[in-house]
Amino acid sequence: MTVIHLFYGPDDFSVREALGEIRIGLGDTALAESNISRLDGAKLKPEELASAAQSMPFFGGKRMVIVEGLLSRFEAKEKRASAKSEASAKKTNSELPAIFAKVFAGVPDSTEVVLLDAEVGRSNPLFKEIASRADVRVFPLLKGSLLDSWVRKRAEKLGVDLSDTARGELIRLVGGDLWVMHGELQKLAAYAMGKPVGIDDIRKLVGLSREASIFTLVDDVIAGRLKPAGEAMYGMLEAGAAPQYILSMLARQLRFLVRAKDLKASGKSDADIQSALGLADFSFRKTLEQATKHTLPRLNDFYRRLLDTDLDIKTGRYDDELALIILITGMSGGG
């Protein structure tokens, strides 16, 4: 039985859904949360992973250990520091993959380990150590016919009766970000209530019309301004934005901010960053402004909490609106 899963790629919406499927296999929702451990792969030590993986599940059943960003530690870096630092990094990279591989080899059948990463190269030393005995799934961004098929199937699942022209217009406006696409389809489902949705409905309801509100909400939350953040959130809810839509837009913007900071730190020009992010001028200017204003640790903290919120919803711990409120008040209140 496979107990190690490696999910990677830029389509983190599908990654989260795959993670949710494994979570369902843990059984009873009320007990499962106590059997889930989340570890930061960027700082993880082999003995910490071993401790989490070897722990016996409460009340029988199975445990799930989720590790984010472990394999990316062993990706080749474009920029190198001093010769001394480089030598130290090579020593670490040559030893740790084999050590982690031994830990993975000893994972009991009672534990499911899920490794999540954005990008993993086939030359990655840890990937080469564990790939042959892991459930490896790659999640690229969907385009063309694959995206069209995904939208059609998701619309059917949500009960949205989309014409071919409406579906094409929806894809043109939203693109391949499945977080946003799913949110827009949920909004269309609530609006149409089973009636056919045409291209005029798409043009009326869809688009990133709430984008400015998302920029404001992100600013207030990250800066710790509780009252304005709450007002922005409730304003969007009262305007008809679904909680999952707000969460998906927050996730989307945070990914852009972290990516923009990373590209800026690597010496990329603003034009190169805008091209890499694929943003229009207004959105890019606001994103770059926010990326400059906020620190990477704070952005990463918010992103990790947002991912935990998504898992809380999927596991049934909270409904989506309560989970959103807890996330916003917790972050903006400094909790």
Image (cartoon, rainbow, N blue to C red):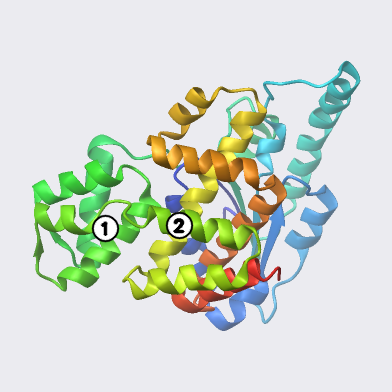
- Amino acid type indicated by mark 1: Arg
Nearer-the-camera pick, 154 or 181: 181
x and y, in percent, of residue 297 in the image:
71, 49
Cα distance in 3D space between marks 2 and 1? 24 Å
**Residue of label 1:** 154
Residue 132 against residue 17 in the figure, above or below: above
Nearer-the-camera pick, 141 or 254: 254
Q: Quadrant of residue 278?
A: top left
x and y, in percent, of residue 16 in the image:
48, 56
Q: Quadrant of residue 34?
A: bottom right
Circle 1 crowding by C-alpha within 10 Å: few under 14, some 14–19, many from 20: some
State the residue at coordinates (69%, 43%).
Answer: 70
**Count of number-bearing discs:** 2
In the picture as drawn, the residue positioned furthest to the front comes out as: 228
- Evaluate whether residue 260 shows in this view: yes
Nearer-the-camera pick, 267 or 75: 267
Q: Are marks 2 and 1 in contact (CB under 8 Å)?
A: no
Which of discs 2 and 1 lies nearer the camera? The answer is 2
State the residue at coordinates (87%, 16%).
Answer: 83
**Residue of label 2:** 214
Quadrant into which the N terminus falls: bottom right
State the residue at coordinates (31%, 55%).
Answer: 209
State the residue at coordinates (64%, 51%).
Answer: 299
Q: Is residue 276 left or right of residue 122?
A: left
The mark nearer the N terminus, 2 or 1, is: 1
Disc 2 secondary structure class: helix
